C-alpha cells in the first residue's frame, strides 16, 4: 500500500458545493492561491519601489500564469498523461540547449533568450519530473522491482546532472528531492530508501570536489557568516538582520531599512521573505507559511481522492515540490541553509518560476475537475 493510500484513511474531508466547485474549481485552493499571490505582489511592490517596471512585469507574469492555469484546467487528464513523456523530453532538450547557447547570469548558464524574452527550462522540470515519474509508475502498474527503480533513477539523474553543470546547486537539489519524494510516495521499500541514503552519503565527498569555489564558500559561510561579512556572508547577515529587526508586527509597508537602503541583496527575488519579515514582522511570515500549508494540504487531499495512479502521484509530486521549494527558501533566508538561489514559489519575482508553478496547479485543478 502506498503512502497516499494510507493518507486517505486519516484525512476524511468532504468537498463543498460552492459555485466554484460546481464549475470544477476547488474554492479553498483558489482562495489560498489568491491570498499568496496578493501578499507576494504587496511585498514586491515594496521591494521594487526604485524599479516599478519590475512590479509591472510581475503583474504580467501572474496574469499570464493564471491564464495558463485556467486553460490547462480545461484539458482532460488523459491528454495530459499521453503528452507527459513528450513534455519531459522537450524540457530536457531545452536544458541541453542552455549549456550550449544559454545566457550567463551571475556566473551560471541557466537561461535561454529569444525574441526579447528569457526563460529558465529547469523551472519547468519541477512539474515535468514528477509527472514523468508518475507516468512510468502508471505504465508499470506501480511495480517497484530493481529494473523499474533503476529507470526512475535515470529519469531523476538526467535533469539533475544538466542543472549541476550549469552550475545551479539549489535547483539540482530541489529536483533530486522531488524525484525521491515521488518514488517514496509510490511505496518503495524502506530498505531501498536507506540504501540510497547510504550511497548518497558515500558520494558526498565527490560532490564536494565537483562544486565551484564560490559554492563551497557559501556552504562554509553557513557555519560562520562573520568569516567573510563583506563577501559570502553578506546575504545571510543582511537577511537575518532584516527579519530580526521586523519584530512581531514589522516596521510597516515600505518602511524596511535593510531593503530600502539596499543592504539586502536580491530582495525582490530569493530574499523576498526577508522583506516580508522586516515590514510585516513575524506575524507576516506566519501568515504566509500558514497559507502555504493550507495550499499543500489541499493539494494532498485532492491527491488522495483521485483513483488513477498517474494523477494521484503527479498531484502529490507537484505538492511536495512546492513544499520543498518553500522550505529551502525559508531556511536559506533564515540562515539555516546555504544561499543556493531558490526562489519562493508564487512570491519571488520571476516569470518562469511563476508560470511553471501555476501550470502545475492547473494540472491539479484539471485532475480534480475530471475526477471519476
Image: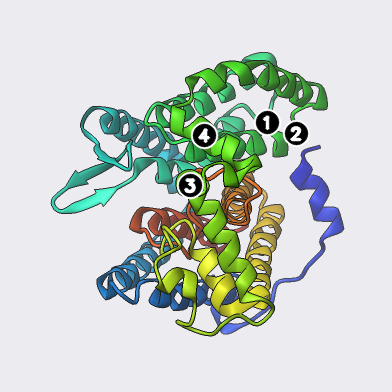
Asked if marks 1 and 2 touch (Cβ < 8 Å), the reply is: yes
Identify the residue position indicated by label 4 in the image: 217
Q: Residue at x 69, y 21 (%)?
A: 201
Could you tell which of marks 3 and 4 lies nearer the N-terminus? 3
Per the image, label 2 sits on a secondary structure element best described as loop
Within 10 Å of the Cα at label 1, are there few (<14), some (14-19), or many (20+) other Cα atoms?
some
For this orientation, the residue located farthest to the right is: 10
Per the image, label 3 sits on a secondary structure element best described as helix
Disc 2 versus disc 3: distance between alpha carbons?
23 Å
> Could you tell me residue 287's position as x and y percent?
65, 74
Could you tell which of marks 1 and 3 lies nearer the N-terminus? 3
> Could you tell me residue 171's position as x and y percent?
48, 40
Could you tell which of marks 1 and 2 lies nearer the N-terminus? 1
Q: Nearer the viewer, residue 14 or 201?
A: 201
Could you tell whether 107 is left or right of 357 in the image? Answer: left
Identify the residue position indicated by label 2 in the image: 187
Could you tell which of marks 2 and 3 lies nearer the N-terminus? 3
Per the image, label 4 sits on a secondary structure element best described as helix
Label 3 vs label 4, nearer the camera: 4
Q: Residue at x 61, y 26 (%)?
A: 140
Identify the residue position indicated by label 3 in the image: 78
Residue 88: mark: none
Identify the residue position indicated by label 1 in the image: 142
Disc 1 versus disc 2: distance between alpha carbons?
8 Å
Per the image, label 1 sits on a secondary structure element best described as loop
Q: Is residue 196 above or below residue 85?
A: above
Amino acid at each position: 500500500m502506498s503512502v497516499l493510500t494510507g493518507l486517505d484513511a486519516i484525512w476524511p474531508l468532504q468537498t463543498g458545493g460552492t459555485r466554484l466547485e460546481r464549475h470544477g474549481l476547488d474554492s479553498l485552493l483558489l482562495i489560498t492561491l489568491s491570498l499568496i499571490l496578493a501578499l507576494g505582489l504587496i511585498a514586491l511592490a515594496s521591494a521594487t519601489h526604485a524599479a516599478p517596471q519590475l512590479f509591472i512585469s510581475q503583474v504580467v507574469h501572474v496574469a499570464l500564469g493564471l491564464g495558463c492555469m485556467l486553460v490547462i484546467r480545461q484539458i482532460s487528464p488523459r491528454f495530459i498523461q499521453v503528452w507527459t513523456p513528450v513534455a519531459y523530453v522537450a524540457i530536457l532538450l531545452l536544458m541541453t540547449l542552455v549549456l550550449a547557447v544559454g545566457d550567463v547570469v551571475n556566473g551560471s548558464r541557466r537561461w535561454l533568450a529569444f525574441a526579447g524574452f528569457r526563460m529558465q527550462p529547469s523551472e519547468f522540470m519541477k512539474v515535468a519530473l514528477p509527472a514523468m515519474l508518475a507516468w512510468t509508475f502508471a505504465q508499470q502498474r506501480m511495480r517497484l522491482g530493481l529494473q523499474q527503480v533503476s529507470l526512475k533513477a535515470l529519469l531523476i539523474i538526467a535533469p539533475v546532472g544538466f542543472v549541476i553543470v550549469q552550475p545551479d546547486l539549489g535547483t539540482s537539489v530541489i529536483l533530486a528531492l522531488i524525484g525521491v519524494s515521488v518514488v517514496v510516495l509510490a511505496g518503495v521499500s524502506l530498505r531501498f530508501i536507506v540504501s540510497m541514503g547510504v550511497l548518497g552519503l558515500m558520494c558526498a565527498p565527490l560532490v564536494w570536489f565537483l562544486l565551484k569555489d564560490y559554492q563551497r564558500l557559501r556552504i562554509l559561510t553557513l557555519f560562520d557568516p562573520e568569516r567573510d561579512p563583506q563577501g559570502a556572508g553578506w546575504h545571510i547577515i543582511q537577511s537575518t538582520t532584516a527579519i530580526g529587526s521586523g519584530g512581531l508586527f514589522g516596521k510597516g509597508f515600505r518602511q524596511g531599512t535593510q531593503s530600502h537602503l539596499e543592504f539586502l541583496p536580491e530582495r525582490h527575488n530569493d530574499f523576498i521573505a526577508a522583506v516580508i519579515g522586516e515590514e510585516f514582522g513575524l506575524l507576516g511570515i506566519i501568515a504566509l507559511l500558514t497559507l502555504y500549508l493550507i495550499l499543500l494540504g489541499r493539494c494532498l487531499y485532492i491527491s488522495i481522492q483521485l483513483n488513477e495512479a498517474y494523477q494521484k502521484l503527479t498531484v502529490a509530486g507537484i505538492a511536495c515540490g512546492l513544499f520543498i521549494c518553500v522550505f529551502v527558501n525559508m531556511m536559506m533566508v533564515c540562515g539555516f541553509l546555504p544561499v543556493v538561489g531558490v526562489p519562493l514559489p508564487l512570491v519571488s519575482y520571476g516569470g518562469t518560476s511563476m508560470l511553471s508553478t501555476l501550470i502545475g496547479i492547473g494540472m491539479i485543478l484539471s485532475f480534480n475537475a475530471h475526477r471519476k
